Each structure stands twice: as C-alpha cells, then as structure tokens.
Amino acid sequence: MPEATTGSGSEPRTLRLQRAMASLVLDADEVALEADPGRVARSQALPGADQQAFRDQAEAMLTYRELARASLIEPLETMFPVTKALLEPAGAWEPCVQAFLEARLIRSGQYRDIAPTFLGWLASTRWGQDRWPFLLELAHVEILEVLVARFPDAARPEGLRAEPTPEDCIVLDPATQILTYTHAVHRASEASPVPEIRPTHLIAYRLADGDARLLELTPATAALLVRAQDRPLGEVAAALGLAGPDAAMTLLKDLHRDGAIAGFQTPT
Amino acid sequence: MTQDRFHGVGLGLRRPHLEEVARREGHGVPFWETCPENVVGDGGRQHRLACAILDRDPVLTHGLTMSVGGYDPWDETYLQDLGDFLLRTGTPWHSEHLCFTRVDANCLHELLPLPFTREAARHTIARARDLQSRLPVPLLLENITYYAELGASDMDEADFISTVLEGADVGWLLDINNVYVNALNFGFDPKAWLSRMPLDRVSQMHIAGHKKFGNLTIDTHGADVIDPVIELMQWTLARLGRPVPVLLERDNHIPDLDALLAERAQIQAAYDAAYDAALASAEARHA
C-alpha cells in the first residue's frame, strides 16, 4: 500500500528534503526504509530526481539513520540503565525508545536535555505504565542525582540563619529535591530492576564538593521538610507528633552542614 | 591581537579532563575550544570548573545545533545567552557548522547535509547573514563531513561552500579531516579540492581522527589523527602562509589528558615546521 503523502509542493524543496531526512532518521518502519529509502522523499512530494537520489545512495542514507539515532539514544542508554534492564527482556526497550523518537519532542539543542525530555514524555504519555506502574518513578530516580548535581547555580537567599529555632521555617538549597515514590525505586538495580512496593521518601541534594547525595527519610521527616518551608518548625513538628524535636533539629543542622538546607529564617 | 592570542594547536575542552586542566595551569595548550551548548545553562561542579578554565585561558567557541541551513526560527532566549557567553569568553569569533540539525522544532543532534542547490545556498546565505547580525563576534562556518548528497544537486560541495561563504561574507572554519574523509568517500583529490576554495576566508582549522565502517569512512573524532591528514594540514598552512589556529578534536574514546597533550605536541611540531617552511619560502621570494 503506498504511504501517505504529507509534504506540500508549495513549500521550499530544501525544507521538504530536510523533512525527508528527519523522517528517515525518526520513522519506525526500518524494513520499509531499507527496501526503499526513496519513500521518505516521495512522502514529501519531492521530484523523482530527489527520490532517486535517496535510492541511489541507500547505504549512506541509512548510515545517517544509524548515526543520528545512535546520537539520540546514547543518552537514554547511559542515563536509564535500570529502566533498560527492566524493559529489554520483555522486548519493550526498543519500542519505548521508538515511540519517544516518533513523538518528536527533542526541542533543546543541549544534549544533556535529551534524558529529561524522555522522562517528561514518560510522564505525559504514561507509556508502559499499565504493565509497569513504577516505570516513571524508576526512570525519575535514575536521573535524579544527575539533575541535582547539574542544577544551575543560583545565588542563595541572604540573611539566613545556620541554627534553627522552633519559630523558623526551612529554606532548601535550590538544587535540593524531596521525593515521595510508591515503590522503593532507589533500591532497584540492573540485576534486579523490579522495585519493592513500599512508600519511599527521599531527599536528593548537592554536597559542597558538587556530588549529589540521596538519603531515605522517614515519612515524618519528609513531611517536616516539606511543610516547614512555609510554617514554623515547632508548629509543624508538633502537628506531626514528632516526639523528639531535638533529634529533628540535629537532622536539620546536619542537612544544613551538608548543603541540602540553605538556612533558616522567620516566616514572612 | 587575535593572531597573537590564537595560534598553534589547541584542544577541545572535554568533561573528563576538567579537573586536571583546572589544576594544571602550565598545561601548554595555547587555547581551548568549547561548545556553548555544553556550558550555557548548566550547573554544578563540572560547570564551575569549565567556567574557571574558560575565564583563565584563551578560548574559541564552536556551536553544534544552531541549524544555520534549517528553517526553524532561532531560539531567541538561547541566542541572548549565547551572546553573553561569547562576550564572557572573549572569543574572537564563533563558529557553527554549514549544515542543518533541526526540522519542525525537533533537534536531531546530528550534523546533516544541506542540498547542494541554488535554493539551499540562497536560503543558507540569508540565515547566516541574519545569525551574524545577532552575534557580538564574527561568525565562521565549518565544512562538514557528508556521506550522501541530500536530493539531486545543482552544484558540487566545493561550489556550494564557496557560494555560501562568499554570499554570507563570513569566515571559514576549515575542517581538514572533513575534507580528507569526504575525499575518501567521494573519490576526489583533497588538494585539488582545496585549491578551488576561498582560502583567504580561513580563520581557523580543525583536525581529527576518523574510522572506516563498511564502504564509508566516518568522521568519528574517536582516533588519533593519521599522517596524511597532518600532511594535508601542513600543505594548507603553506598555502595560507599565515598561522591560523588549529584545533585538535577528540569527542569519542577520549584518552587521558597526558596522551592527548602528547598528540597535540606532535601536531604542534608539524604545524611549526609547516609555518617555518612557509616563512622561509616567503623570505626566499623577497630576497
């Protein structure tokens, strides 16, 4: 069956040639492309001479497909090895990557943005999450430390205190993230990619030397770190029923020393 | 003076070497080349190291994804950030590739060939002129490696590049390895090809390694530079008769810094020998 023609003859031929090349790189049907690379030129309503050029240089045109796809897929394989280890035995890794490529969402010219774009695509499409309900959480935790380590540097708010009082609220470092997952995805590995079903609270932050650190939190500590960003620590601790406020204060001081908390200030 | 700050053989600044380069001020590399896409908007320790090196050492900038021959509108926010970055580094020019990388708002992260046609040349000239008007430093365009012609051609690669460089009135980042690889893949004489080109527009050169896969030679930037490419660099320097900076590119299978510095020193020796010979020849002509 002939493929649909999507190109318009009224658009510049150069643009249609570029669209044909993009199709050659991103389209799914590899067997059909290998049989006739000229199909992508035909679908853009390009003249017969252009279609023939695609066919006459089939090996080189398919090399472009291989090179460009390798360039786009490499950051996914590097950043999501556990996700790949989960999907590949089920024959789902390549379809997942292909579906992402066909969605054509890679807008940024910055190579480091490809992996977060993939994560955003997983979140918006829920691809594979009927079968693997933890898939998004797994992919997220895989790039969490990199996102924290490379978070753009920003000036910290001024006038923060290093020692918390019960009247203070918490100001996190801009790179710090507090996460709640339904699965213990941070324990998954390439050897054991299916995580335990267990509500999990994590804090990810950047140390002074630039490395990222991931710590598991108790539910109460996680709630304290979230709620006490705009309410007094003492009030939040009491509401959470934290029995030993001194222990909480010690943890807060440690997180401040390590850089996760920028400081403490009176709520405005 | 640009020529005083930027001559000899420089290196691409790569993440695996940042710690060591930041620590070693006496590294002997006359300048670094950096890709703004890899620095602008980034953060963290590696970013701080890169910025410290770029603030300390002479730097040339080399873009990857502007898509000069494409149709997507410029990313105005990035262009503003890029301009600020170029000024911060003090680069005397900014180079981009004579190719397209974006189609319909999608970045393909690959240097894709433009059609060798009058229409594509006219379009690329207009785009390059527009981009130049938005940058705070002169724009250079680099000849790429290509493995196929995109569609039916009106002209050959040499005519296409010359037409765009002249029409846009921009400088040329001459990638010697790309000329060599294209010559292998398309069966032409690289010196004859270079002899047709507007060498007066060359402001910088690139040199790199490549590898053969099947019937095609691929510009991998993943191997040592081979002697015929070094010899072609020397031949070109002799034709130019002036010491344009040469950048040794290495993006894959990146060796440790000492190994890369050793390869740089070898190419620097070849560079010095070629330039000395060109000077001696000029002196003899005027004697």
Image (cartoon, coloured by chain):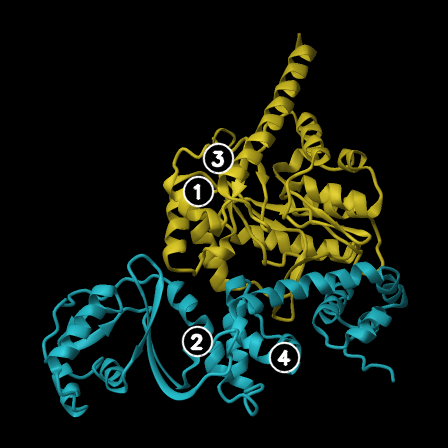
Q: Is residue A196 above or below residue B213?
A: below
Whether the residues at callouts 4 and 3 have beta carbons within 8 Å, the answer is: no
Q: Where's residue B30, x and y in %? A: 48, 33
Q: Are marks 4 and 1 on the same chain?
A: no
Q: Quadrant of residue A30?
A: bottom right
Q: Nearer the viewer, mark 3 or mark 1?
A: 3
Disc 3 marks which residue?
A: B29
Disc 1 marks which residue?
A: B90
* SS class, disc 1: loop
Question: What residue is at 42 percent from the left and 77 percent from the top?
Answer: A187
Question: What residue is at 49 percent from the left and 28 percent from the top?
Answer: B4
Disc 4 marks which residue?
A: A89
Q: Chain of mark 4?
A: A
For chain B, the rendered hue is yellow
Chain assigned cyan: A
Instruction: Tell me the crowding category of disc 3: few under 14, some 14 to 19, or many 20 or more residues within 10 angstroms, Cα based.
Output: some
Q: Nearer the viewer, mark 4 or mark 1?
A: 4
Q: Are marks 2 and 4 on the same chain?
A: yes
* SS class, disc 4: helix
Report the Cα–Cα distance between label 4 and label 3.
Answer: 47 Å
Report the Cα–Cα distance between label 2 and label 4.
Answer: 21 Å
Disc 2 marks which residue?
A: A141
Point out which mark residue A108 bears: none
Left or right: where B90 falls relative to B112: left
Disc nearer the start of the sequence (2/4): 4
Q: Nearer the viewer, mark 3 or mark 2?
A: 2
